[in-house]
Amino acid sequence: MGKKRMIVKIGSSSLTNERGEIDRYKFTDHILAIAKIQKMGHEVIVVSSGAVAAGFRKLGYSSRPITLKGKQAAAAIGQGLLIQSYMEALLKFDTLAAQILLTRSDFNNQVRFRNAYDTIMELLDRKVIPIINENDTVSIEELTFGDNDMLSALVSGLVHADLLVILTDINGLYDQNPFKYPNASRIDFLNEITDVQMKATDGAGSKVGTGGMYSKLNAAKTAMELNVPVFIGTGKGEDKLISILNGTGDGTYLSNQQMKKINTKRQWIALHSTVKGKIYVDKGAEKALVHGGGSLLSPGIVKIDGSFLSGEVVEVRFENQLIARGEVSCSSQYLTQTAHEKNRIKEVIHRDKLVLESNRSEGK
């Protein structure tokens, strides 16, 4: 087996005890597994929950706080405790850990998106294990639905991981909620995620974290769209990540071999960018884009909606159908002013900065 790049997402339920504090037995178990698989030559990135769960007791809360300020204050305490624990534990294996705090807004901004990628790659090149977490002290919406699951999926796409491992306290996905139905059967492998599977996860999750199985399945769906295989399940012992990587983990594997990789630039355009306007094209341009793999040229534009600058992202539509997203090379003002100059041909969106909606839906 060649060198693999793994994202290991560790949920609060897999890291803390019932009192919400870091469980040293569970934590050590993860550290042993992470250190061992890295020593085998594989690259490991950890997306770790647990900051709020680790910190709320220190603030005097008897249980996990429900107010935003309580969660953020607990995260401010717990994040330091969490990364300190990782760094001290991994140093025993002569391995450095580095903390990276992210929010969804870091993915929305193209410069920060690229900087996150460069930083993670530099750390991996130097054999440092990045420990990534949601920046809970400043985020708002993310705290309400356990976004570290989605964060792990987005990171897995960003770094073109070979496998996303979502560790939890449930050994995989079931055909119905195993907490409600004792005869529920585990699903060992899925090559697509349907509404039936999403519905079957209703209510399945732990009491410590904010994300349940629905959150994990939703994250897995995003990772699969980025052509990253996923494992959702549990495991014990220093060999658990090796077993998961070898396909014998205690959980569910999700993968779609029909998916194709999306490079970093197109990922940002397809998933993270903010659309600033719309460009409507004629039939000839639609054919060139969808079937010919071409760039969008100015003569094919029939209408412009919105105001946008060079370098911003727009939707490309044929009639009322969305066919692509792309980064424009000129402003809406320029296109409006030169619309009557039919002999002036301008490359408005280069094909390398264009993501077809069909490709986006199919994960290409």
Image (cartoon, grey):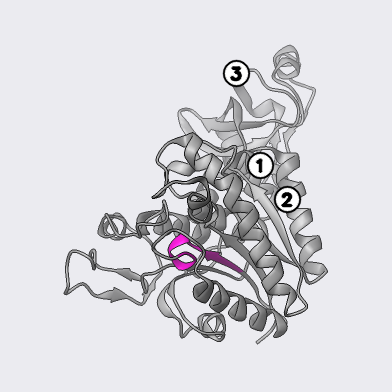
Magenta span: 7-16
Asked if disc 2 and disc 1 are in contact, CB closer than 8 Å, the reply is yes
Quadrant where the C terminus lies? bottom right
Q: Position of residue 247 (x, y in %)?
A: 49, 83
Q: Is residue 165 magenta?
A: no
Neighbourhood count class around disc 2 (C-alpha, 10 Å): few under 14, some 14–19, many 20 upward: some
Neighbourhood count class around disc 1 (C-alpha, 10 Å): few under 14, some 14–19, many 20 upward: some
Residue in the image at 60% along x and 32% along y: 274
User: On residue 106, which mark appears?
Assistant: 1
In this rendered view, identify the residue nearer to me: 74 or 128: 74
Q: Is residue 232 visible?
A: yes
Q: Is residue 288 visible?
A: no
Residue 241 vertical position relative to residue 264 in the rendered view, above or below: below
Circle 3 or circle 1, nearest the eye? 1
Q: Is residue 12 magenta?
A: yes
Return the residue at label 3: 306
Q: Position of residue 87 (x, y in %)?
A: 71, 66
| Earlier residue among tags 3 and 1 | 1
Q: Position of residue 10 (x, y in %)?
A: 52, 65
Return the residue at label 2: 116
Labels in figure, total:
3
Does 326 sit left or right of 94 as displayed?
Answer: left
